[in-house]
Image: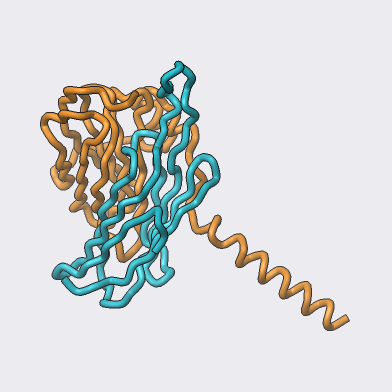
Chain colours: A orange, B cyan
Amino acid sequence: MMQRRKFIKALFAASALALMPIKAFAAMWNTPAFQAIKLQEALTTLQISNVSLSNNIQIIAPDKAENGAVVQIEVTSHIPNTESIAIFVENNPTVLIANFMFSEGADGFVVTRIKMAETSDVLAVIKSGNRYFSAKKRVEVLENGCG
Amino acid sequence: MSENMRMRAQIKGEITEVKVLMTHPMETGRRKNDVGDLIPANFIQLVSATLNGKPLIEAQWGTAISKNPYLTFHLRGAKVGDVVRVNWTDNQGKTGAGEIAVSAA
């Protein structure tokens, strides 16, 4: 009996471990947010509201992108306790590009390369506590990169 | 380190700069091949980064991250020899991973 109990305990421990890598993600992939065509729809789906413009967010991106298939975007948030940076391109077929969530030990900073279908504002929305802050940068796209 | 990822993690003053280059087609599902058939969507959806196993960054990506995704992020408090690991999962359930030890500048 004792052994059986031990075995069941061990089984539970093992299954908890097996579940860890999945649980490590705060959420599963947010399908509705990534399918959103309009910016407002994407923001609503991500439960982002009352966004204030902030000078403490810096977006570095080219004024003109020769090739929309590869546009390098750098976002730096100087807002204390930056929990996440979401990047949107208003004129893309779907507006949400990526959402980066930071734990303690990682700065509110990211550089990545994105596809842009046409000239658009690139919008970064930062979450800090229950507040949201944003900045945008216009990128003129000379050649469509979404295909 | 796996073949589908190239990484570098270097201490630069107060921060550790981590650069990651992944190998992935990042197909949107909207592109057509030469005979006019749609190429199925094939893109990374989830990315996570850890330092010595401790979660640091979790990201969700859509189809508009460029082919062969590139990423730079900054860590604080990392020491030489600490291990940065990056994992990804795409919409077809495939996974990739890479690891690199933090080095001095």
- In the displayed orientation, state which residue is furthest to the right: A1
| Residue B74 percent location from the top left of the image | 24, 60
Query: Which residue is drawn at the image coordinates 41% and 63% (left, top)?
Result: B55
Q: Is residue A129 left or right of residue B17?
A: right
Q: Quadrant of the C terminus of chain A?
A: top left
Q: Quadrant of the N terminus of chain A?
A: bottom right
In percent of width and height, residue A59 lies at: 17, 42
Quarter of the view holding residue B48 = bottom left
Q: In which quarter of the image is residue A143?
A: top left
Q: Is residue A10 left or right of residue A130?
A: right
Residue at 21%, 46% (x, y): give it: A75
The residue drawn where x is 27% and y is 62% is B8
Residue A117, placed above or below residue B20: above
The residue lying furthest to the top in this view is B36
Most foreground residue, A77 or B30 = B30
- On screen, A35 above or below A25? above
Residue B34 lies, with reference to residue B21, above or below; the image says: above
Give the percent coordinates (x, y) of residue B22.
Answer: 35, 50
Image position, residue B26 (x, y; %): 39, 37
* Residue A9, quarter of picture: bottom right
Q: In this view, does A15 lie to the left or right of A101?
A: right
Q: From this viewpoint, which residue is outermost toward the front?
A: B34
